[in-house]
Image (spheres, grey):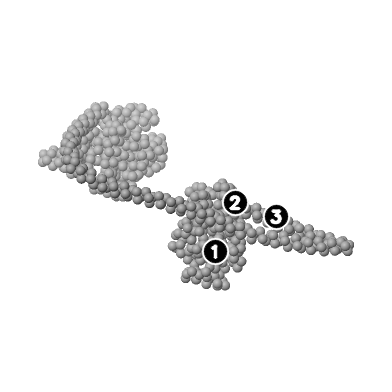
């Protein structure tokens, strides 16, 4: 056996002779596993010496042995596929190749076999070769890369280095068909160099055939003849009929192009001879006979399995019938006892059902009461917001009204003075007074229009939501409600004072929102911010520390509002978001408070000062009504920042 292995690529005839002697001895002494080893290696040798009928017979016997002993079948399946491939039957070749590959991969996943370096690399390599021959280049490239990665995991200089030559040749063939000749040339040279290094004659001749194919695509006919001739001579020594067939075909085509028809005819005859050596009509017929025999064997085995299953099912039916009879007897025994217990259980269940129904009616009433209370609280929150809005409007209008009153009183005094000058006939003074009166009237008109626009704008923003989105200037909306909230706080507490800072991106595109709803959200956030920076009666250590800080002369109560456009993440597409930030330097929140701040009915304000629905409603408006986000960042004693993100 070892002598045959040593001569496998150098002297095929001696290899076959030694393997047959080893097989005869293994069978004689009854060693099944050594018999299997001889069958595998002998089948491999027949594959590479162009005797597919004998090779398939060997591997079919290996397959039967593997089925009987529950051992790995992937190698036998793979070589049966290789021999079908040699006959040009790529469909059967791919079928056996895929079965071998999937069986081996499944064994790896289940860790049912040790990883065999040859199968680990050879499986995807064979799939790649088959797909390349069938013209499915995407699949061929996928499996070629898988095989290449796996051999690099091992070692290209190990005992499986000959696979590296075949993988590089496969890449070359794929790149030739993809019309990428330079990539093909690189891989053919890699295969050639490695084959020379490890003295792998078969792959060496395949590499030369690849180079001949490359030069034929480049129309360099002398180089085609050089490499194809070398490949033919080398393949003849090792009975590499597949290489002989391809090399003679290339030589025929090259000589035809050069106009040397006698040489072309010579290699045409050689090509036919090489083809018949591998896949002649007689061999194809013999291979088909083997396939039919194997198919019949499988049918017989299947019939035996079905017969065994039928007998097994019959036994199951008999045992099942006996079990049913025993069960029926036991059931009859228990029915009487169960019937009486069932009557007692039914009476108890009816009693429990009546109690559950009564409790259900009570729970329904409680639920209705809770819903009514919730509706009242939400309405209360809306009315509270409206009250604060109204207070802000009143304070905002007061300034222009003061101007109107002051200038109208001053104008009355000027008219009295002008009448006196008229009586005196002082024309110059009369004209000066009339100019002053006209100026005052212009100021009255200006501030009157200002008051009118304030009322109109505030009514527009405070009206009931229509639920219809409109193009809105976020900067203007944020600024208006900031002033309203501030004046509302001033209306309730004249001693209250705070700094308002705005940092609006300008210009900022208008955005489609429901302005009344977003205005309600902003008003709620502003009110909370002003409440946080306003001095409150101390209720705990944290608030005491904040109040002591607020009393410090360096502390300035500040509410900051900013807007900006935020672009979408790179590669995400879309148009980004509009960001509104409301920040204060007030009391801040603890981690536990921050976790519950958007929950309905949760509030940290004193009893009677808040419903706990403001931030909950704001969250629903932003997230559900506008598809945005409402977030908060806060540290205890260090202020809070709310962030509104609206999709643009």
Q: Residue at x 18, y 37 (%)?
A: 321
Q: Which residue is mark 2?
A: 463
Q: Residue at x 37, y 29 (%)?
A: 256
In the rendered image, residue 584, in percent from the top left (x then y), is placed at 54, 63
Q: CA distance from mark 3 to mark 2?
A: 21 Å
How crowded pointer 3 is (Cα within 10 Å; few <14, some 14-19, many 20+) is rated as few
What secondary structure is marked by label 3?
Answer: helix
In the rendered view, does 594 fall on the left or right side of 231? right
Q: Which residue is mark 3?
A: 449
**Does residue 289 sit above or below 392 in this rendering?**
above
In the foreground, 121 or 207: 121
Q: CA distance from mark 2 to mark 1?
A: 25 Å
Task: Tell me if I can see residue 406 in this picture.
Answer: yes
In the rendered image, residue 641, in percent from the top left (x then y), is placed at 51, 61
Nearest to the eye among marks 2 and 1: give it: 2
What secondary structure is marked by label 2?
Answer: loop
Dividing the picture into quadrants, the one containing residue 164 is top left
Dividing the picture into quadrants, the one containing residue 51 is top left
Q: Which residue is mark 1?
A: 531
How crowded pointer 1 is (Cα within 10 Å; few <14, some 14-19, many 20+) is rated as some
Q: Which comes sooner in the sequence, label 3 or label 2? A: 3
In the rendered image, residue 293, in percent from the top left (x then y), is placed at 21, 30
Q: Residue at x 13, y 39 (%)?
A: 27
The extreme right residue here reads 425
Dividing the picture into quadrants, the one containing residue 216 is top left
Check residue 460 in the rendering and tell me which mark sits there, or answer none. Answer: none
């Amino acid at each position: 056996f070892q002598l045959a292995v040593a001569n496998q690529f150098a002297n095929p005839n001696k290899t076959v002779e030694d393997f047959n002697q080893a097989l005869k001895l293994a069978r004689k002494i009854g060693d099944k596993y050594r018999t299997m080893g001889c069958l595998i290696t002998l089948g491999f040798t027949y594959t590479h010496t162009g005797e597919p009928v004998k090779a398939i017979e060997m591997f079919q016997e290996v397959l039967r042995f593997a089925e009987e002993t529950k051992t790995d079948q992937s190698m036998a399946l793979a070589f049966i596929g290789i021999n079908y491939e040699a006959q040009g039957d790529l469909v059967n070749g791919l079928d056996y190749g895929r079965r071998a590959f999937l069986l081996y991969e499944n064994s790896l996943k289940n860790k049912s076999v040790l990883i065999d370096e040859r199968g680990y690399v050879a499986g995807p390599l064979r799939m790649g070769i088959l797909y390349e021959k069938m013209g499915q280049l995407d699949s061929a490239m996928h499996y070629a890369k898988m095989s290449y990665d796996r051999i690099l995991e091992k070692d290209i200089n190990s005992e499986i280095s000959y696979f590296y030559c075949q993988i590089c040749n496969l890449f070359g063939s794929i790149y030739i068909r993809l019309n990428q000749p330079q990539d093909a040339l690189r891989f053919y040279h890699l295969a050639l160099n490695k084959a020379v290094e490890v003295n792998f004659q078969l792959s060496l001749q395949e590499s030369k055939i690849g180079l001949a194919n490359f030069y034929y695509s480049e129309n360099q006919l002398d180089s085609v003849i050089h490499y194809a001739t070398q490949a033919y001579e080398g393949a003849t020594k090792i009975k590499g009929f597949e290489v002989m067939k391809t090399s003679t075909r290339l030589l025929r085509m090259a000589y035809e192009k050069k106009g040397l028809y006698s040489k072309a005819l010579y290699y045409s005859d050689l090509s036919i001879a090489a083809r018949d050596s591998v896949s002649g009509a007689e061999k194809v017929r013999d291979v088909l006979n083997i396939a039919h025999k194997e198919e019949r064997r499988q049918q017989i085995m299947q019939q035996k399995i079905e017969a065994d299953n039928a007998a097994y099912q019959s036994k199951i039916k008999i045992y099942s019938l006996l079990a049913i009879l025993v069960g029926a007897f036991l059931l009859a025994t228990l029915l009487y006892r169960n019937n009486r217990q069932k009557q007692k259980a039914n009476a108890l269940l009816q009693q429990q059902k009546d109690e559950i129904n009564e409790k259900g009616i009570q729970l329904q009433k409680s639920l209705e009461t809770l819903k009514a209370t919730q509706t009242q609280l939400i309405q209360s929150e809306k009315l509270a917001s409206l009250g604060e809005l109204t207070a802000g409007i009143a304070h905002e209008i007061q300034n222009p009204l003061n101007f109107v009153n002051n200038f109208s009183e001053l104008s009355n005094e000027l008219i009295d003075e002008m009448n006196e000058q008229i009586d005196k006939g002082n024309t110059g003074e009369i004209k000066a007074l009339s100019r002053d009166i006209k100026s005052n009237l212009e100021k009255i008109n200006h501030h009157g229009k200002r008051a009118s626009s304030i009322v109109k704008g505030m009514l527009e923003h405070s009206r009931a939501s229509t639920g219809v989105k409109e193009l809105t200037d976020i900067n203007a909306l944020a600024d208006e409600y900031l002033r309203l909230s501030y004046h509302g706080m001033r209306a309730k507490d004249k001693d209250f004072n705070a700094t308002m800072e705005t940092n609006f991106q300008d210009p900022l595109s208008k955005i489609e929102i429901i302005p009344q709803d977003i205005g309600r959200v902003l008003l709620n956030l502003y009110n909370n911010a002003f409440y946080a920076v306003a001095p409150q009666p101390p209720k705990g250590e944290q608030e005491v520390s904040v109040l002591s800080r607020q009393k410090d002369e360096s502390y300035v109560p500040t509410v900051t509002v900013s807007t900006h456009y935020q672009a979408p993440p790179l590669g995400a597409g879309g148009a980004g978001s509009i960001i509104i930030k409301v920040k204060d330097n007030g009391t801040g929140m603890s981690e536990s408070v921050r976790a519950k701040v958007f929950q309905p009915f949760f509030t940290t304000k004193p009893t009677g000062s808040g419903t706990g629905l403001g931030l909950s409603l704001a969250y629903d408006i932003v997230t559900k009504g506008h598809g945005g986000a409402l977030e908060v960042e806060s540290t205890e004693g260090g202020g809070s920042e709310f962030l509104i993100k609206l999709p643009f």
